Structure formats: structure tokens, C-alpha cells
Amino acid sequence: MKKNIIVLVSGGMDSATLLWLAKKEFDEVYAISFNYGQKHSVELDFAKELVRLAKVKQHFVVDIPHLKGIKGSALTDSSVEVPSESYPDEPPITTVPMRNLNFLSIAASFADVYEIENIGIGIHSVDSPYPDCRAEFASSVEAAINSSSIMVAKKKNRIRVYTPFLGMTKTDVLKLGLELGVPYEKTYSCYKGTLPPCGECATCQQRQEAFESLGLKDPLFR
Ligand SMILES: [Zn+2]
């Protein structure tokens, strides 16, 4: 049987790297992106272009408006500003409540119907400040998906939450992506949603630091 996967693609560096890795490791690749009321919804244009370049079998773009209605996250709440620098709070003000749980359960609905056995998410780093980017989260959501899956109940197989970057740093992910030929000039990570990206918010800083640690310059800030 063909090995297949559905990859969560935001348009950022990590998910782009995961998409290129999936193209190498799997026979059939699907992609899914979410319009969740994020201020930086411009990232979806980048996600669509990356998915087009990666030539996936199908790309699903899903609207989930309820997250914007829940106040409190700097990524979705217009009354909370995206910090211009790294944030000391843990979890950060940019945490969107249960975002990855929402994303993975929706991706799992597609996996169940399209009979896709892997769901890829580009979470990384051992001690992520985001609760829904940790290994414990990934393994428990995988258990929940398997216990509620029609496909699993019928076929007695498993759905895997594929997290190859867990335990890696952003620099590790970048190093791998450069080997895979990821077009990083076509990715977008800025939480402020500006064009060109602001260069100052935590995500803009993190990606520039990753490039600098390899002696390179981020192509978005040349
Ligand atoms: Zn930025």
C-alpha cells in the first residue's frame, strides 16, 4: 500500500521543511491550511504557493472562525498587540488556545475519510513555550485520534501524528531544509502580518537567528 500523509502547512519555515521532507518520505502527500482569523493571514498566500511548488495531491484550506471569537491571543485579538520583541511570558501572549488540537482534529477528519495514515505537524524544540507543541501533546492527541477513527475501527490499522522535528532546534530544521532544497524565500513567518515582514517580532527574529547560526542571511531580509 502507498504511504500517505496530510501535512499541516502554515506558510512558515517549519511546515515548509516538513512538506519537502514528506515529499521525500511518502508516496502521496496532501496538505491542509487554516484560516483561523490570524492577523497574519497573508501567510495563507505563501502556503498556497509552497503547496503548488511541492505538487501535492490535494490542498485543503479550512475556515475556522471560532478561534478569533475567543479573545486573549495576540494572534487573533485586535485589542492585544503582537509584541515587537521576544516575550518573557510562558505560555506567550501569542498562544492561541488549543490551536494545534483544533488543527489536528480537523486534519484527522480528512485523514479518516481519505484513508490517510499519517498527519504531519512541524512542531519542534524540546522545551517549547507553547503547550500544544510538546511531545506529550502529540502522543496524547494521536491516541485520541486513533480511538475515534472510523478507518482505524474498520481496518485495525493506525493513524500516526508524524512529528519528525520534535527534539530538534529551528537551526536543525533549517539545516535539513537546505539539504532538501526548501525555497525559504517563498516562506512567511511574521506574526504582525506585514509585507515585507517586520523583522522584529519573535518569529521574525527566530528565523533570522537560525540562518545566522549557519553563517547565512535569511533571504527575506536581504
Ligand atoms: Zn515579524
Image: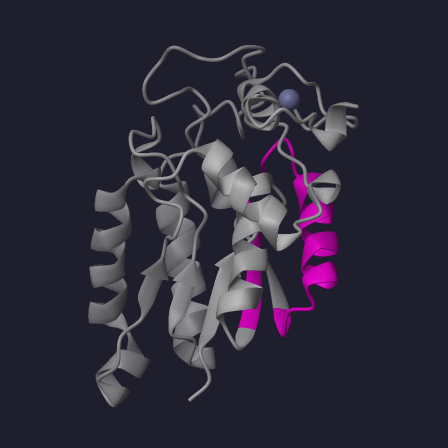
What is the quadrant of residue 167 in the picture? top left
Taking the image as shown, residue 215 lies to the left or right of residue 108, namely right
Q: How many marks on residues?
A: 0
Q: Which residues are magenta?
A: 29-58
Task: Name, please, the residue furthest toward the front.
Answer: 215
* On screen, residue 155 above or below 197: below
How far across and how far down the image is residue 12, in percent?
60, 41
Residue in the picture at 69% in, 68% down: 55
Q: Quadrant of ligand 1?
A: top right
Say whether residue 35 is visible.
no
Residue 93 higher or lower than 33, as above or below: above
Residue nearest the observer in this picture, 211 or 144: 211
Q: Quadrant of the C terminus?
A: top right
Q: Residue 208: horizontal and vertical position, in percent?
A: 62, 23
Q: Is residue 95 left or right of residue 56?
A: left
x, y percent for residue 88? 38, 10
Side of 141 where 31 appears, left or right: right
Question: Which of 115/210 is in front?
Answer: 210
Q: Which residue is at 42% across, 81% downward?
A: 115
Kindly indicate the quadrant of the structure image that contains residue 144.
bottom left
Residue 105 image offset from top left, x and y in percent: 37, 59
At x 58%, y 19%, the residue is 205
The N terminus - image quarter: bottom left
Q: Residue, x 66% and y 39% (percent of image)?
A: 41
Does the magenta segment cover residue 51?
yes
Q: Nearer the viewer, residue 212 or 154?
A: 212
The type of colouring in the image is one colour
